[in-house]
Image: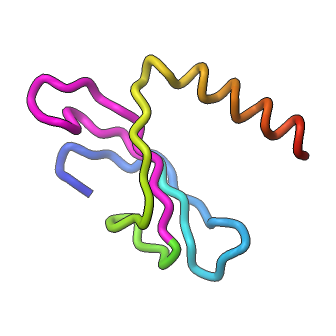
Amino acid sequence: MSKDSKLLKSFKLAGTKTGTISVSHIEEPYGGDSAAVVSIGISLKGDINEPDWKAHIPYENLDDLIEALNAAKKENA
């Protein structure tokens, strides 16, 4: 994780022995003038510093993402 990152939460990835999901705040992920993002990382080995997959979500899109996740949960729970 870079020095401009702050881990907000990590938790076990269901269906794996050691996998984790991590949620972090990242300042200037693409250089000096880029906006902060929420980074969601998936690590099958449990290493939050080296995720196998990650997605950077602009803060402006968080409400839409949360709405979509809640709809997915409601439809498939």
Q: Residue furthest bottom?
A: 17
Residue 65 in percent (x, y) is at 60, 28
Check if residue 32 falls in the magenta segment.
yes
Q: Residue at x 22, y 38 (%)?
A: 29
Residue 60 in percent (x, y) is at 44, 17
Q: Residue at x 89, y 37 (%)?
A: 75
Q: Is residue 27 left or right of residue 77?
A: left
Snapshot quadrant of residue 41:
bottom left
Vertical placement of residue 14 versus 63, above or below: below
Vertical placement of residue 62 versus 44, above or below: above
Q: Is residue 44 left or right of residue 47?
A: right
Q: Which residues are magenta?
A: 24-43
75 or 63, nearer to the observer? 75
Residue 18 in percent (x, y) is at 57, 79
Check if residue 17 falls in the magenta segment.
no
Query: Can you say which quadrant of the picture contains the N terminus?
Result: bottom left
